[in-house]
Amino acid sequence: MKNNKISVTSDNIFPIIKKFLYSDQEVFLRELISNAVDAIIKLKTLMKLENLYDVVDDFKIKIIIDKINNTLHIIDNGVGMTKKEIDEYINQIAFSGAEEFVKKYKNLTDPSNIIGHFGLGFYSSFMVANKVMILTQSYRKNELSMFWSCEGDPNFTMKEIEKRERGTEVILFLNKENSEFLEYDRILKLLKKYCKFMPVKIFLSSKGSKEDKEIIVNNINPAWKKNPIQLDDKNYLDFYHELYPNQLEDPLFWVHLNIDHPFHLTGILFFPKVEKRIDIQKDKIHLYQNQVYITDNLEGIVPDFLSLLKGVIDSPDIPLNVSRSHLQSDTTVKNISRYITRKVADRLNSMYLKNREDFQKKWENIKIIVEYGMISTQNFFEKAIKFFIFCTVNKNYFTLEEFKEKIKTTQKNKEGKIVFLYSSDQYKQYSYIKEAKNRSYEVLILDSPLSVHLIQKLELSYQDICFVRVDSDHIDKLIDFDKKNTNSELSENEKKDLKNLIKDHINIMENLEFSIQLEDLSAKENPFLIVIPEFIRRIKEMNSVIGKDIKEKYYQLIVNTNHILMKKILKETLEEKRKRIIQEALNLTLLSKNLLYGKNLTDFVSERLKNLIKE
């Protein structure tokens, strides 16, 4: 028997482990099972190198819960350890590993994800156990079976024991504070979280309980590890629902990732139905390393817009023991991010070219993902502009270049820019769209929360276009042609009087402030028009996306000086009647602005204005 002290640079590594990783103690199970997987994979390699034909290759890992003795057993039939190897791998915690961990832990957003990378994986067991035992037998038959025990301090016991079967058994004597890890459902949940796709079969049972029968808990050959040629649509859909068992809807399509050089990466990304929402995803993309679950927080590893997707990325080349800021500057991570971005863009472009009609059917459900990517990631923007499609109010679809070609002669302003008229809500902006159609203009629907940001991006990238919302000015001012203005039927003094009269009666809603602008429009046009100038509205919308609201005080009231109602207002001598005419006309205009839901209401407003003129 050997009694000695574990070799560490610190007097006691255990307080470090418990202090810095206590809140994430569940990770101990992942680390111990990962060690078991490594032991089996190592033996598989040695079988080939050393021609070990007599080794039985029914490899598996057993997790046994023993509530009677308050123990949790992790058993593998892998390579096992000799006395020398226990000294090397267990008794000597690497000096640099412990020291480096202490230095770097403060910079880590999730230290539980990197225990194993500092050589401390096995010792994570002391976060939940007050005593840990190891029983092990090397695959080398002439080696002795060994016993090792430690009670959470630098002292340990090691001795020879009776011959055992090949492999290693780790026994955790759980402390009272962590008795939850003796519950079958708790362990099963952790296995499903961390070990669901580990490459060795994992069996779970609970000694002396109704769950004593062994069940297998993992899929050792998940879809992302297979060649895409081997998979059909059903295989991908089955895997999606295996990943996300609570998701009822199927994904729209997917991207299979597979590259071996200059880095190793496999995975599958699924496009769910997102529509117009930018939700914080409950089920995010999962990061694995060699089929071992690491995290679902990929910030700094992939572009932000991919957070709207679901799926798996598996790469051993992503460094985990560094800060997020270092991740973003890491060359390999940058290359991985660019690769994933390119694969997503190529998949979308392929769908667009192969079957545009089907692509258009899916467009409303994926548009916001594409917009997010175009706004936030330049190399994605450069690819996506080829397949990004605009939808008009008539449900016709155009790429940017197609739409420019269609409207370049009819919707070009005096500066030579092609004007993209658009609506954010074709029901509320019905009358404005109607006016545009009457002039044979094409109007786009841009109704996502990111539309205003995409517009800014497109205008910066293409100097020959500009975007103008249909309700941001009078229809004749939306596309500023170089043409003569309509003459006014009012004198300058009458205009001045009219402006003052309207200004006195404009307090129809307390939270709205109007600037008044007199325009010499056609007598057939409406008497009033309420708009928010394009640049003011964009500022308001951009702020609302980030949760900062601006009060509605930038409305502009356009007064049509040539409308017959203006002469009626000027001629009216009875103050109360004049006030009522202005008030009702303004109310009808405000009604059109706020509640315009289609043709019926528009016709009502028009009819009511006619009656007002006749009075």
Image: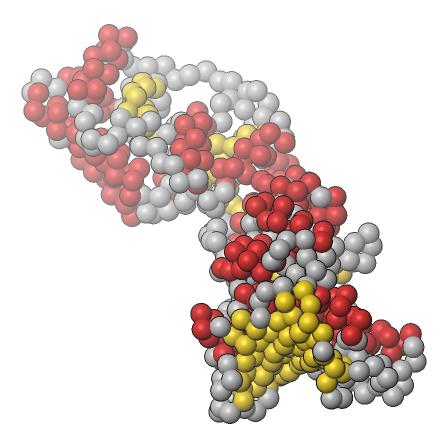
Residue appearing at x 29%, y 48% in the figure: 600
Residue appearing at x 52%, y 75% in the figure: 174
Check the picture and name the quadrant holding the C terminus.
Answer: top left
| Front one among 607 and 330 | 330
Question: For this view, does 306 lie left or right of residue 262?
Answer: left
Question: x, y percentage for residue 479?
Answer: 49, 27
Residue appearing at x 58%, y 60% in the figure: 14
Question: x, y percentage for residue 431?
Answer: 36, 39
| Front one among 284 and 542 | 284
Q: Quick check: 239 above or below 60?
A: above
Question: For this view, does 274 lie left or right of residue 514?
Answer: right
Q: Quick check: 48 above or below 442?
A: below
Check the picture and name the quadrant holding the N terminus.
Answer: bottom right
Question: x, y percentage for residue 169?
Answer: 67, 80
Q: Quadrant of residue 328?
A: top right
Model colouring: secondary structure
Q: Quadrant of residue 157?
A: bottom right
Question: x, y percentage for residue 571?
Answer: 15, 17
Whether residue 437 is visible: no
Whether residue 459 is visible: yes
Q: Quadrant of residue 221?
A: bottom right
Residue appearing at x 64%, y 75% in the figure: 149
Question: For this view, does 243 lie left or right of residue 42?
Answer: left
